[in-house]
Image: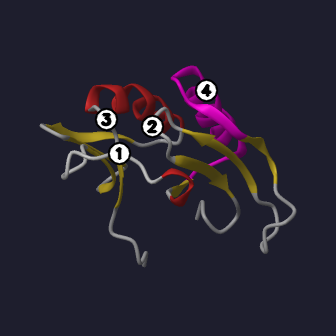
Amino acid sequence: MSIVDHLSVGVPSIEAGRKFYDAVMEAIGANCLAAGDGFAAYGTTRVEFLLLLPFDGGAPTGGNGTHIGLVAPSQAAVDAAYNAALANGGSDEGAPGPREAYPIPNVYTGYVRDPFGNKIEVIHNGFAAQ
C-alpha cells in the first residue's frame, strides 16, 4: 500500500500547466482524469497528482525544494517523458540514464524542471514499476 494519497504542484495557469503535464503524463501511461476552475488532476485509475493555482495568489513554486518522482513502466517511458517535457517547455536537470548512486540496483531516471520551476524526476526500477 502506498503512503501517499496525492501530490500537487502550483502552476501560474492551468492551461499552461496542462500543456506540459498532459504530454509528460501520457508518456508514463497516466492522463488527466478531471479538470476545472483552478485545478487539473492526473492518474491512471485514481487521482494521484494535481496542478493547482496557488490558494494565496503567491508564487506557484518553492524552487528546488519541490521534487516529484513519477513512476515509469519502462526505460523507454522515462526517455519519452523526458523528451515530452523538453518539447513542452521544460528544461534539462539530468538526462535519462542509469543512476549508480541510488541504493537499489537498475535504476534508470531522468530529471527535468517544468516551466514553473518544479523539479520532476521520472524513474524506472524493478521495485517502482511493480
Dots 2, 1 in contact, CB < 8 A: yes
Which residue does the numbered mark 3 point to in the structure image?
Answer: 12
With respect to residue 51, does 14 lie above or below?
above
Circle 1 sits on which residue?
60
* Residue on which disc 2 sits: 116
What amino acid is labelled 4 in the image?
Answer: Leu
Image quarter (top left, top right, bottom left or bottom right) of the N terminus: bottom left
Tell me whether the residue at label 1 lies in contact with that at label 3, contact meaning CB atoms closer than 8 angstroms. yes
Segment colored magenta: 71-93
Question: What amino acid type is highlighted by mark number 2?
Answer: Phe
Q: Residue at x 24, y 43 (%)?
A: 53
Q: Quadrant of residue 126?
A: bottom right
Sequence-first disc among 4 and 2: 4
Using the numbered discs, state the Cα–Cα distance from disc 2 to disc 1 in whole angstroms.
7 Å
Label 1, label 3: how far apart the Cα atoms are: 6 Å
Residue beneath the point at 58% across and 65% down: 130
Residue 78 is a magenta residue: yes
Picture coordinates of residue 23 (x, y %)? 47, 29
Alpha-carbon span between mark 4 and mark 1: 20 Å
4 or 1: tag closer to the N-terminus: 1
Q: Position of residue 88 (x, y in %)?
A: 51, 23
What whole-number distance in Å separates the C-alpha atoms at marks 2 and 3? 7 Å
Residue at screen point 61% across, 49% down: 122
Q: Nearer the viewer, mark 4 or mark 2?
A: 2
In the current view of this chain or complex, which residue is farthest to the left? 37
